[in-house]
Amino acid sequence: MRDTSLLQLALGLTPPWAVSRADFDAAARRLDVEIDFVPGSRFPCPGCGTADRPVHDTERTTWRHLNFFQHQAYLTARVPRIRCDNCGVRTAGVPWARADSGFTLLFEAMVMTMVGAMPVAAVARMVGEHDTRLWRIIHHYVEQGRANTDASEVTRVAIDETAARRGHDYLTLFVDIERARVLFATEGKDAATVAAFADDLTAHGGDPAAVTEVCIDMSPAFIKGVGENLPNAAITFDKFHAVQIVNDAVDQVRRDEQKSQPDLKKTRYVWLKNESNLSGGQRQTRDSLASRNLKTARAWSIRLAFQDFYRITSGNAAEAFLRQWYFWATHSRLPPMIDAARTIKHHWDGILRWFDSRIANGLIEGINSLVQAAKAKARGYRSTRNLKAIVYLLAGKLDLKLPA
Protein backbone atom coordinates (compact mmCIF):
# COMPACT_ATOMS: atom_id res chain seq x y z
CA MET A 1 0.00 0.00 0.00
CA ARG A 2 1.85 3.11 -1.24
CA ASP A 3 -0.75 5.71 -0.38
CA THR A 4 -0.63 6.03 3.40
CA SER A 5 -2.68 9.21 3.76
CA LEU A 6 -5.90 7.36 4.59
CA LEU A 7 -4.17 5.38 7.33
CA GLN A 8 -2.61 8.61 8.59
CA LEU A 9 -6.08 10.12 8.97
CA ALA A 10 -7.62 6.95 10.41
CA LEU A 11 -4.98 6.70 13.11
CA GLY A 12 -5.25 10.39 13.92
CA LEU A 13 -1.51 10.90 13.78
CA THR A 14 -0.10 14.41 13.98
CA PRO A 15 3.48 15.68 13.56
CA PRO A 16 6.10 14.59 14.30
CA TRP A 17 4.46 11.18 13.76
CA ALA A 18 3.49 9.89 10.33
CA VAL A 19 2.70 6.59 8.59
CA SER A 20 5.76 5.68 6.56
CA ARG A 21 4.46 2.51 4.88
CA ALA A 22 1.90 -0.28 5.13
CA ASP A 23 2.05 -3.94 4.14
CA PHE A 24 -1.00 -6.12 3.68
CA ASP A 25 -0.66 -9.91 3.67
CA ALA A 26 -3.96 -11.47 2.57
CA ALA A 27 -2.74 -15.03 3.15
CA ALA A 28 -1.66 -14.24 6.69
CA ARG A 29 -4.79 -12.06 7.20
CA ARG A 30 -2.57 -9.30 8.58
CA LEU A 31 -2.02 -5.58 8.06
CA ASP A 32 1.26 -4.03 9.25
CA VAL A 33 1.52 -0.27 9.50
CA GLU A 34 4.92 1.38 9.94
CA ILE A 35 5.06 4.69 11.83
CA ASP A 36 8.04 6.98 12.10
CA PHE A 37 8.89 10.44 13.37
CA VAL A 38 10.45 13.33 11.52
CA PRO A 39 14.25 13.36 11.85
CA GLY A 40 15.47 16.00 14.29
CA SER A 41 12.26 15.88 16.33
CA ARG A 42 12.46 16.49 20.07
CA PHE A 43 10.18 14.99 22.71
CA PRO A 44 9.11 15.74 26.29
CA CYS A 45 10.68 13.71 29.09
CA PRO A 46 8.16 11.12 30.40
CA GLY A 47 9.72 11.44 33.85
CA CYS A 48 9.85 15.16 34.64
CA GLY A 49 7.88 16.53 31.70
CA THR A 50 10.64 18.81 30.47
CA ALA A 51 9.94 19.65 26.81
CA ASP A 52 12.21 19.47 23.76
CA ARG A 53 14.53 16.69 24.89
CA PRO A 54 16.85 15.37 22.15
CA VAL A 55 16.64 11.78 20.86
CA HIS A 56 19.34 9.51 22.25
CA ASP A 57 18.46 6.39 20.23
CA THR A 58 15.38 4.39 19.21
CA GLU A 59 13.71 1.06 20.01
CA ARG A 60 11.56 -0.78 17.48
CA THR A 61 8.20 -1.63 19.08
CA THR A 62 5.00 -3.29 17.81
CA TRP A 63 1.44 -2.97 19.12
CA ARG A 64 -1.73 -4.91 18.31
CA HIS A 65 -4.39 -2.57 16.91
CA LEU A 66 -8.08 -2.89 16.06
CA ASN A 67 -8.76 -5.36 13.26
CA PHE A 68 -8.79 -4.08 9.69
CA PHE A 69 -12.10 -5.70 8.69
CA GLN A 70 -11.43 -9.39 9.51
CA HIS A 71 -7.63 -9.00 9.42
CA GLN A 72 -5.42 -8.41 12.42
CA ALA A 73 -3.63 -5.06 12.34
CA TYR A 74 -0.33 -4.11 13.95
CA LEU A 75 1.44 -0.79 14.36
CA THR A 76 5.24 -0.74 14.45
CA ALA A 77 7.35 2.31 15.21
CA ARG A 78 10.83 3.44 16.05
CA VAL A 79 10.20 4.74 19.57
CA PRO A 80 12.70 7.40 20.60
CA ARG A 81 14.61 7.23 23.82
CA ILE A 82 15.32 10.77 24.90
CA ARG A 83 18.22 12.16 26.89
CA CYS A 84 17.14 14.27 29.86
CA ASP A 85 19.49 16.24 32.11
CA ASN A 86 17.24 15.43 35.09
CA CYS A 87 16.15 11.82 34.44
CA GLY A 88 18.82 10.38 32.17
CA VAL A 89 17.84 8.27 29.18
CA ARG A 90 14.09 7.56 29.13
CA THR A 91 11.69 6.05 26.56
CA ALA A 92 9.37 8.72 25.15
CA GLY A 93 5.64 8.18 25.12
CA VAL A 94 3.61 7.60 21.95
CA PRO A 95 0.07 8.97 21.43
CA TRP A 96 -1.53 5.69 20.35
CA ALA A 97 -0.49 3.42 23.26
CA ARG A 98 0.33 3.60 26.93
CA ALA A 99 3.74 2.70 28.28
CA ASP A 100 4.63 -0.99 28.62
CA SER A 101 1.55 -2.19 26.73
CA GLY A 102 1.61 -4.37 23.64
CA PHE A 103 -1.77 -2.98 22.53
CA THR A 104 -2.99 0.34 21.22
CA LEU A 105 -5.32 2.44 23.34
CA LEU A 106 -8.24 1.79 20.98
CA PHE A 107 -7.68 -1.97 21.13
CA GLU A 108 -7.67 -1.80 24.93
CA ALA A 109 -10.85 0.27 24.93
CA MET A 110 -12.54 -2.36 22.78
CA VAL A 111 -11.41 -5.14 25.12
CA MET A 112 -12.64 -3.29 28.22
CA THR A 113 -16.03 -2.75 26.59
CA MET A 114 -16.32 -6.43 25.70
CA VAL A 115 -15.25 -7.84 29.09
CA GLY A 116 -18.01 -5.85 30.74
CA ALA A 117 -20.52 -7.98 28.84
CA MET A 118 -18.92 -11.42 28.46
CA PRO A 119 -16.31 -13.70 30.05
CA VAL A 120 -12.67 -12.74 29.56
CA ALA A 121 -11.86 -16.15 28.07
CA ALA A 122 -14.56 -15.64 25.43
CA VAL A 123 -13.19 -12.20 24.55
CA ALA A 124 -9.68 -13.69 24.29
CA ARG A 125 -10.93 -16.26 21.78
CA MET A 126 -12.71 -13.61 19.74
CA VAL A 127 -9.70 -11.30 19.47
CA GLY A 128 -7.13 -14.09 19.16
CA GLU A 129 -5.10 -13.25 22.26
CA HIS A 130 -4.21 -15.24 25.37
CA ASP A 131 -6.49 -14.25 28.24
CA THR A 132 -3.46 -13.54 30.48
CA ARG A 133 -2.62 -10.56 28.27
CA LEU A 134 -6.20 -9.31 28.50
CA TRP A 135 -6.18 -9.60 32.29
CA ARG A 136 -3.19 -7.24 32.33
CA ILE A 137 -5.31 -4.69 30.47
CA ILE A 138 -8.23 -5.17 32.86
CA HIS A 139 -6.10 -4.80 35.97
CA HIS A 140 -4.48 -1.64 34.63
CA TYR A 141 -7.76 0.17 33.96
CA VAL A 142 -9.53 -1.10 37.09
CA GLU A 143 -6.63 -0.06 39.30
CA GLN A 144 -6.48 3.31 37.55
CA GLY A 145 -10.22 3.74 38.01
CA ARG A 146 -10.05 2.82 41.68
CA ALA A 147 -7.16 5.21 42.26
CA ASN A 148 -9.43 8.02 41.03
CA THR A 149 -12.43 6.99 43.15
CA ASP A 150 -13.79 9.77 45.36
CA ALA A 151 -15.22 8.46 48.64
CA SER A 152 -15.39 11.83 50.40
CA GLU A 153 -19.19 11.82 50.68
CA VAL A 154 -19.71 8.23 51.81
CA THR A 155 -21.91 8.03 54.91
CA ARG A 156 -24.07 4.90 54.45
CA VAL A 157 -22.56 1.51 53.74
CA ALA A 158 -23.87 -2.03 53.24
CA ILE A 159 -21.56 -4.96 53.99
CA ASP A 160 -21.95 -8.58 52.92
CA GLU A 161 -19.84 -11.53 51.82
CA THR A 162 -19.98 -13.45 48.56
CA ALA A 163 -18.44 -16.81 47.69
CA ALA A 164 -15.17 -16.43 45.81
CA ARG A 165 -14.96 -20.09 44.84
CA ARG A 166 -16.22 -23.47 45.97
CA GLY A 167 -15.32 -24.24 49.54
CA HIS A 168 -14.85 -21.58 52.15
CA ASP A 169 -13.22 -18.73 50.23
CA TYR A 170 -15.11 -15.46 50.46
CA LEU A 171 -14.98 -11.87 49.33
CA THR A 172 -16.51 -9.21 51.53
CA LEU A 173 -18.11 -6.36 49.58
CA PHE A 174 -18.57 -2.83 50.90
CA VAL A 175 -21.23 -0.89 49.00
CA ASP A 176 -21.89 2.84 48.98
CA ILE A 177 -25.67 2.82 49.43
CA GLU A 178 -26.26 6.33 48.08
CA ARG A 179 -24.46 5.72 44.78
CA ALA A 180 -25.14 1.96 44.55
CA ARG A 181 -21.50 1.12 43.87
CA VAL A 182 -18.95 -1.31 45.29
CA LEU A 183 -16.38 0.76 47.12
CA PHE A 184 -14.14 -2.06 48.30
CA ALA A 185 -13.78 -5.82 47.93
CA THR A 186 -11.41 -7.90 50.02
CA GLU A 187 -10.73 -11.53 50.89
CA GLY A 188 -12.26 -13.04 54.02
CA LYS A 189 -15.33 -12.28 56.10
CA ASP A 190 -13.89 -11.39 59.50
CA ALA A 191 -13.49 -8.17 61.49
CA ALA A 192 -10.22 -7.44 59.70
CA THR A 193 -12.15 -6.83 56.47
CA VAL A 194 -13.84 -3.81 58.06
CA ALA A 195 -10.46 -2.48 59.21
CA ALA A 196 -9.15 -2.86 55.65
CA PHE A 197 -12.21 -1.01 54.34
CA ALA A 198 -11.65 1.87 56.78
CA ASP A 199 -8.08 2.20 55.55
CA ASP A 200 -9.17 2.08 51.91
CA LEU A 201 -11.93 4.62 52.56
CA THR A 202 -9.38 7.01 54.06
CA ALA A 203 -7.04 6.49 51.11
CA HIS A 204 -9.84 7.61 48.76
CA GLY A 205 -10.73 10.79 50.61
CA GLY A 206 -13.39 9.30 52.88
CA ASP A 207 -13.63 9.40 56.66
CA PRO A 208 -14.55 6.29 58.68
CA ALA A 209 -15.95 8.60 61.37
CA ALA A 210 -18.33 10.12 58.79
CA VAL A 211 -20.06 6.76 58.22
CA THR A 212 -23.29 7.03 60.20
CA GLU A 213 -25.27 4.03 58.94
CA VAL A 214 -24.15 0.47 58.24
CA CYS A 215 -26.30 -2.47 57.15
CA ILE A 216 -24.89 -5.93 57.93
CA ASP A 217 -26.04 -9.43 58.71
CA MET A 218 -25.74 -10.69 62.28
CA SER A 219 -22.16 -11.89 61.90
CA PRO A 220 -20.30 -11.29 65.18
CA ALA A 221 -17.18 -10.53 63.13
CA PHE A 222 -18.89 -7.74 61.21
CA ILE A 223 -20.43 -6.35 64.41
CA LYS A 224 -17.01 -6.28 66.04
CA GLY A 225 -15.35 -4.79 62.96
CA VAL A 226 -17.90 -1.99 62.66
CA GLY A 227 -17.62 -1.16 66.35
CA GLU A 228 -13.83 -0.91 66.18
CA ASN A 229 -13.40 0.85 62.83
CA LEU A 230 -16.57 2.84 62.06
CA PRO A 231 -17.09 4.48 65.46
CA ASN A 232 -20.14 6.61 64.62
CA ALA A 233 -22.03 4.04 62.56
CA ALA A 234 -25.44 2.89 63.76
CA ILE A 235 -26.00 -0.75 62.80
CA THR A 236 -29.10 -1.89 60.95
CA PHE A 237 -29.36 -5.65 60.73
CA ASP A 238 -30.40 -6.71 57.27
CA LYS A 239 -34.11 -7.52 57.33
CA PHE A 240 -33.73 -10.30 54.76
CA HIS A 241 -31.18 -12.00 57.01
CA ALA A 242 -33.49 -11.67 60.01
CA VAL A 243 -36.37 -13.20 58.05
CA GLN A 244 -34.04 -15.99 56.89
CA ILE A 245 -33.25 -16.88 60.51
CA VAL A 246 -36.96 -17.37 61.20
CA ASN A 247 -37.43 -19.26 57.92
CA ASP A 248 -34.59 -21.64 58.81
CA ALA A 249 -36.25 -22.29 62.16
CA VAL A 250 -39.55 -23.15 60.46
CA ASP A 251 -37.76 -25.60 58.18
CA GLN A 252 -36.00 -27.18 61.15
CA VAL A 253 -39.38 -27.72 62.82
CA ARG A 254 -40.65 -29.34 59.63
CA ARG A 255 -37.64 -31.62 59.29
CA ASP A 256 -37.98 -32.74 62.91
CA GLU A 257 -41.70 -33.35 62.58
CA GLN A 258 -41.60 -35.17 59.25
CA LYS A 259 -40.07 -38.16 61.03
CA SER A 260 -43.51 -38.79 62.52
CA GLN A 261 -45.53 -37.00 59.82
CA PRO A 262 -44.40 -38.32 56.40
CA ASP A 263 -46.81 -35.96 54.60
CA LEU A 264 -44.40 -33.12 55.44
CA LYS A 265 -41.65 -34.56 53.30
CA LYS A 266 -40.81 -32.47 50.22
CA THR A 267 -42.96 -29.58 51.44
CA ARG A 268 -40.17 -27.20 52.40
CA TYR A 269 -41.08 -24.41 49.98
CA VAL A 270 -44.78 -24.76 50.74
CA TRP A 271 -44.00 -23.21 54.14
CA LEU A 272 -41.24 -20.78 53.11
CA LYS A 273 -42.50 -19.19 49.89
CA ASN A 274 -44.49 -15.99 50.00
CA GLU A 275 -48.18 -16.47 49.30
CA SER A 276 -47.99 -14.77 45.90
CA ASN A 277 -45.26 -17.18 44.76
CA LEU A 278 -47.09 -20.40 45.57
CA SER A 279 -48.50 -22.49 42.74
CA GLY A 280 -52.09 -23.67 42.96
CA GLY A 281 -50.96 -27.16 43.98
CA GLN A 282 -48.58 -25.82 46.64
CA ARG A 283 -51.28 -23.62 48.10
CA GLN A 284 -53.70 -26.54 48.25
CA THR A 285 -51.10 -28.73 49.98
CA ARG A 286 -50.27 -25.99 52.45
CA ASP A 287 -53.90 -25.27 53.31
CA SER A 288 -54.59 -28.97 53.80
CA LEU A 289 -51.62 -29.43 56.13
CA ALA A 290 -52.21 -26.15 57.96
CA SER A 291 -55.70 -27.33 58.97
CA ARG A 292 -54.11 -30.14 60.96
CA ASN A 293 -52.68 -29.72 64.42
CA LEU A 294 -49.04 -29.70 63.24
CA LYS A 295 -46.04 -28.10 64.86
CA THR A 296 -44.91 -26.97 61.43
CA ALA A 297 -48.19 -25.10 60.91
CA ARG A 298 -47.70 -23.27 64.20
CA ALA A 299 -44.12 -22.37 63.24
CA TRP A 300 -45.39 -21.14 59.88
CA SER A 301 -47.90 -18.84 61.62
CA ILE A 302 -45.09 -17.36 63.71
CA ARG A 303 -43.09 -16.81 60.51
CA LEU A 304 -45.98 -14.97 58.86
CA ALA A 305 -46.30 -12.71 61.88
CA PHE A 306 -42.60 -11.84 61.76
CA GLN A 307 -42.95 -10.82 58.12
CA ASP A 308 -45.85 -8.55 59.10
CA PHE A 309 -43.44 -6.82 61.52
CA TYR A 310 -41.62 -5.20 58.60
CA ARG A 311 -44.88 -3.83 57.17
CA ILE A 312 -45.47 -1.62 60.21
CA THR A 313 -44.86 2.07 59.54
CA SER A 314 -44.22 3.34 63.08
CA GLY A 315 -41.10 2.49 65.06
CA ASN A 316 -42.94 2.56 68.39
CA ALA A 317 -45.70 0.31 67.07
CA ALA A 318 -43.07 -2.00 65.58
CA GLU A 319 -41.32 -2.45 68.93
CA ALA A 320 -44.62 -3.20 70.68
CA PHE A 321 -45.45 -5.73 67.94
CA LEU A 322 -42.00 -7.34 68.19
CA ARG A 323 -42.38 -7.75 71.96
CA GLN A 324 -45.67 -9.61 71.42
CA TRP A 325 -44.10 -11.73 68.69
CA TYR A 326 -41.14 -12.56 70.92
CA PHE A 327 -43.46 -13.70 73.73
CA TRP A 328 -45.44 -15.87 71.30
CA ALA A 329 -42.33 -17.45 69.75
CA THR A 330 -40.59 -18.15 73.07
CA HIS A 331 -43.75 -19.76 74.47
CA SER A 332 -44.41 -21.86 71.37
CA ARG A 333 -42.71 -24.99 72.79
CA LEU A 334 -40.91 -25.25 69.46
CA PRO A 335 -37.14 -25.24 70.22
CA PRO A 336 -36.01 -23.95 66.78
CA MET A 337 -38.50 -21.05 66.97
CA ILE A 338 -37.42 -20.28 70.53
CA ASP A 339 -33.77 -20.17 69.43
CA ALA A 340 -34.65 -17.91 66.51
CA ALA A 341 -36.58 -15.55 68.79
CA ARG A 342 -33.65 -15.36 71.19
CA THR A 343 -31.35 -14.50 68.29
CA ILE A 344 -33.73 -11.70 67.35
CA LYS A 345 -33.77 -10.51 70.96
CA HIS A 346 -29.94 -10.51 71.08
CA HIS A 347 -29.92 -8.18 68.05
CA TRP A 348 -32.97 -6.18 69.11
CA ASP A 349 -31.70 -2.62 68.62
CA GLY A 350 -30.18 -3.29 65.19
CA ILE A 351 -33.40 -4.92 63.98
CA LEU A 352 -35.54 -2.01 65.18
CA ARG A 353 -33.04 0.41 63.66
CA TRP A 354 -34.51 -0.47 60.27
CA PHE A 355 -37.53 1.70 61.06
CA ASP A 356 -35.23 4.73 61.24
CA SER A 357 -32.65 3.92 58.55
CA ARG A 358 -34.86 1.96 56.11
CA ILE A 359 -31.75 0.35 54.65
CA ALA A 360 -31.33 -3.30 53.76
CA ASN A 361 -28.87 -5.43 51.84
CA GLY A 362 -31.19 -5.95 48.89
CA LEU A 363 -28.86 -3.74 46.85
CA ILE A 364 -25.79 -5.75 47.76
CA GLU A 365 -27.65 -9.02 47.17
CA GLY A 366 -28.37 -7.79 43.65
CA ILE A 367 -24.67 -7.06 43.18
CA ASN A 368 -23.84 -10.52 44.55
CA SER A 369 -26.17 -12.05 41.97
CA LEU A 370 -24.46 -10.07 39.21
CA VAL A 371 -21.02 -11.23 40.38
CA GLN A 372 -22.06 -14.87 40.77
CA ALA A 373 -23.69 -14.87 37.33
CA ALA A 374 -20.48 -13.51 35.78
CA LYS A 375 -18.46 -16.09 37.68
CA ALA A 376 -20.72 -18.90 36.49
CA LYS A 377 -20.49 -17.78 32.85
CA ALA A 378 -16.71 -17.66 33.15
CA ARG A 379 -16.66 -21.03 34.98
CA GLY A 380 -14.77 -19.32 37.78
CA TYR A 381 -11.65 -17.19 37.90
CA ARG A 382 -8.10 -18.39 38.34
CA SER A 383 -7.35 -15.92 41.12
CA THR A 384 -9.16 -13.81 43.69
CA ARG A 385 -7.43 -10.77 42.20
CA ASN A 386 -9.19 -11.44 38.90
CA LEU A 387 -12.55 -11.84 40.62
CA LYS A 388 -12.10 -8.56 42.49
CA ALA A 389 -11.26 -6.81 39.23
CA ILE A 390 -14.52 -8.10 37.71
CA VAL A 391 -16.47 -6.97 40.80
CA TYR A 392 -15.11 -3.45 40.43
CA LEU A 393 -15.64 -3.48 36.67
CA LEU A 394 -19.27 -4.62 36.91
CA ALA A 395 -20.36 -2.83 40.08
CA GLY A 396 -17.76 -0.22 41.01
CA LYS A 397 -19.04 2.53 38.68
CA LEU A 398 -15.42 3.37 37.89
CA ASP A 399 -14.39 6.14 35.54
CA LEU A 400 -12.07 4.08 33.34
CA LYS A 401 -11.14 7.05 31.13
CA LEU A 402 -11.15 4.89 28.02
CA PRO A 403 -10.20 6.56 24.73
CA ALA A 404 -13.11 7.23 22.40
Image (cartoon, rainbow, N blue to C red):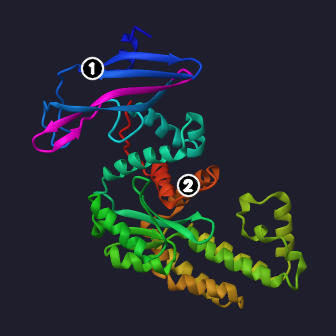
Secondary element under disc 1, as helix, strand or loop, is: loop
Residue type, mark 1 in image: Thr
Residue 52 in the image: state x and y as whole percent.
13, 30
Position in image of residue 264 (x %, y %): 85, 76
Residue 260 located within the stretch drawn in magenta: no
Q: CA distance from mark 1 to mark 2?
A: 42 Å
- Nearer to us in this view, 354 or 172: 172
Residue placed under numbered mark 1 in the picture? 14
Determine the main secondary structure of the stretch shown in magenta: strand
| Label 2 CA crowd tier, 10 Å (few <14, some 14–19, many 20+) | many
Q: How many marks?
A: 2
377 left or right, relative to 138:
right
Q: Is residue 328 visible?
A: no
Camera-side residue of 91 and 268: 91
Q: Residue furthest right?
A: 262
Q: Along the horizontal axis of the image, is 293 left or right of 223? A: right
Left or right: 174 as drawn, with respect to 293: left
Residue 38 in view (yes/no): yes
Residue shown at the point (33%, 38%) measured from the top left: 98
Residue that carries the numbered disc 2 in the rendered image: 371
Amino acid tagged 2:
Val
Q: Quadrant of residue 69?
A: top right
Mark 2 lies on a secondary structure that is: helix
Tell me where residue 365 sits by quadrant.
Answer: bottom right
Q: Residue furthest top?
A: 3
Q: In which quadrant is the C terminus drawn?
A: top left
Frontmost residue, 42 versus 250:
42
The quadrant of the rendering that contains the N terminus is: top left
Q: Residue at x 78, y 68 (%)?
A: 270
Q: Residue at x 22, y 40 (%)?
A: 90
Quarter of the image for residue 321 reads bottom right
Q: Which residues are magenta?
A: 68-94
